[in-house]
Amino acid sequence: MSGTVEATYWIETAFPLEQAAATMAGEQSTGTFVRVPGETDALREAHAARVVSIEELGDAERPSLPGSGLPKTGDGRRRTARVTLSWPVHNFGPSLPNLLATVAGNLSELKAFSGLKLVDLTLPPVFLDRYQGPQFGVAGTRELAGVDDRPMIGTIVKPSVGLSPEATAEQVRTLLDAGVDFVKDDELQADGPACPFDARISAVMRVINEHAERTGKKVMFAANLTGDIDEMLARHDHVLREGGTCVMASMNSIGLPAMKVLRAHSQLPIHGHRNGWGMLGRSPAIGMSFVAYQKLWRLAGIDHTHVNGIDNKFCEENESVIASARECLTPMFDPPHPGCEVMPVFSSGQSARQVPATYAALGSTDLIFAAGGGIMAHPGGPAAGVRALRQAWDAAVAGVDLADAASQAPELRDALSAFAA
Amino acid sequence: MSGTVEATYWIETAFPLEQAAATMAGEQSTGTFVRVPGETDALREAHAARVVSIEELGDAERPSLPGSGLPKTGDGRRRTARVTLSWPVHNFGPSLPNLLATVAGNLSELKAFSGLKLVDLTLPPVFLDRYQGPQFGVAGTRELAGVDDRPMIGTIVKPSVGLSPEATAEQVRTLLDAGVDFVKDDELQADGPACPFDARISAVMRVINEHAERTGKKVMFAANLTGDIDEMLARHDHVLREGGTCVMASMNSIGLPAMKVLRAHSQLPIHGHRNGWGMLGRSPAIGMSFVAYQKLWRLAGIDHTHVNGIDNKFCEENESVIASARECLTPMFDPPHPGCEVMPVFSSGQSARQVPATYAALGSTDLIFAAGGGIMAHPGGPAAGVRALRQAWDAAVAGVDLADAASQAPELRDALSAFAA
């Protein structure tokens, strides 16, 4: 089996960088602390992880994480670096679960490091022999939603929990009347006893189907089917029966093998919700970047994923948001293999105000732009909220300054004064 | 549906603690930044998460994590605290994936916090309606392994990768001859092209079965079947067919829904490998403690799990190792419900030297004590390595000082000098 996996890490260590990188490579391939019988040089040569590159960055003033060790002799410096390792894929085969044990297993606990974070991952196309990648991606999602020349304007059903199926459907009706392209369930509500999945989807799809018959526009509803595997497959079938066009699953809640099963079964785009990613991604010193993370899930079969938003209400920096979004639209594999691009979903405190910076940074309208309060709390009502977002995107794409556009567009003007920075 | 879920967090925030805790509760239940139509007080009352307790701890000198916000007015202090929240289980139902989205979802990214870690979790017994818990646990594992009155002495096949099925079986033969009770595959090797699972297990089980016929002792081999769901079920069946008595899966690699499927299918104990847990658990400021984490996996059906070891080669502190191990043996539910206890597995740089402290801290021999170099690198050979470990445990249980015991036990004496601290 040919091909190599490359993984890039940010590391922080008091050990010489070459030694630290060799420790990482050894731990995750042929290494053990004591050489054992049967371990020949040829065997090491064929299976050892290799250190591809070490790029030294600045020194750290203090250890970012506790529990690290110090070299017996050293120069007293604590260095940071970007280190790339590679593994022959024949060590583990094209298996995402086993890839994880290799590139994101025991490494984080090694004593030589006071910081170690997986920041990027490059996989060989042989993984496509086993994983299907996105079924719909950008083009398929646009076709199902009937939106081809601008971002899809999305929103969310709120409150997260407590609405009955009928009350949820009434919320959705308001959002449809407002003119959105996309509505998502909240990640906190899948099949709670007070709002069972089947009843909720039936009620919501009645409203969406009626609206589609009247207007010709079938709004996409991302039905949160997160659950155990049998539940998810049955819920998918219910969505399909009711005429729905999208399902949503919380990636961290279900794991890669369950996503693979869902992808193989699904006839609908899969909206990959990343809640919980902060546990892995928020610390600069440990865990995994979203740039690395989303590649695993794209291969497993999601069609959309969340990237937060510019000036979001959470703690993610804009630079990180944009890096994630760009990555979603960057091919993972060269032709003739599929690129597995997915649609990035911007959300969290988004309004017309963030549109110019989002477009400037991404240079594309292949995205879902989701606003909650930014639509529902518009002073002119939800329809004005949606119009304001479309006006803002039209202006951004046309290269017109937002304030100038607002002078011709009352909904945009009201949005900018209502949602001041 | 009755019952509540309680989750306890360590938090660090520049906001007043009451306000910070209320933000957590709101974000993960009925909260949104703008109140929306349909959101009545009664609905909030029935579904809101509640702040159960706030225990203030010391102040933090500086933010542990970047990206946090400051209150508009404040006293300039950055407090830390232990905060417990509760949710009515009727918000999400007894579903582990949906529980995760609630207790470990967006919280980690909230701007009000410069640190937020899930440290404990209490679940109501209604979860047992959907999850089976451990099938074998401590007693079932002991019975299968034929070890009832002392710790199971375990070891690992090394090197991690590169051995052929036959070479792996030869390693196992050496370990069986040495007298171990338990052997585990490495987490890096499941079904790599150079050592396919089926061929490896067939070769290993031939050796184990022959040894069992000769000695009456069937050594337990934890076969690493980590993979996609179809693969794992087929591999389980192969282990069973070959007379194996244990399977192993990397928990972070497969996810809770896949573990549930494996548990429902399995006729063997499931050894839950926690590699990758460092990404979630190593930072004191983000992620999840192993105390919280292992409860999810016990409910999903593991029978054993790793807790690292005293004075391990990784960066985990002894206090944390012991807290994890104790928790594995502490019932999750009161009678008449099953306690879902699982066998803790000590490993990583373990030798006879760590035995007294391990026993003193745990007060139990319900554990697997795994040593790699501690067995293979014993100056008297692997059999002497195993004898030394058993001698050390006999001494610890009898309350005899290790040095005193060594004066009567040459293997132990050699171990103590070979594996000096």
Image (cartoon, coloured by chain):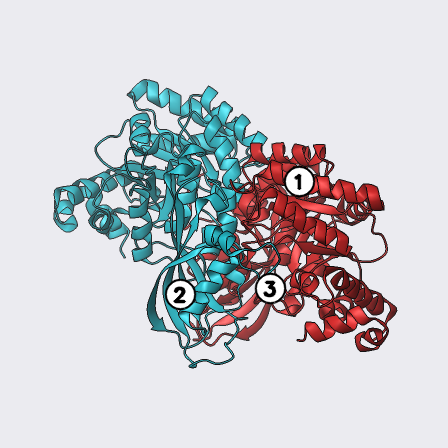
Chain colours: A red, B cyan
Locate residue B67, reporting x and y percent: 55, 70
Tell me the residue at 68%/61% (across/down).
Answer: A376
Residue under label 1, please give it. Answer: A203
Q: Are marks 2 and 1 on the same chain?
A: yes
Chain designation of label 2: A
**Measured along the vertical axis of the image, is residue B395 above or below residue A109?**
above
Side (left or right) of B296 relative to B109: left
Tell me the residue at 39%/25% (across/down).
Answer: B208
Distance, label 3 to label 1, CA atoms, is 25 Å
Q: Are marks 2 and 3 in contact (CB under 8 Å)?
A: no
Residue under label 3, please give it. Answer: B34
Chain designation of label 3: B
Q: Are marks 2 and 3 on the same chain?
A: no
Locate residue A413, reporting x and y percent: 78, 73
**Quadrant into which the N terminus of chain A falls:** top right
Viewer-side label of 2, 1: 1
* Callout 1: SS: helix
Q: What's under tag 1, amino acid-wise? A: Ala
Distance, label 2 to label 1, CA atoms, is 51 Å
Residue under label 2, please give it. Answer: A66
Quick check: can you spot residue A1? no
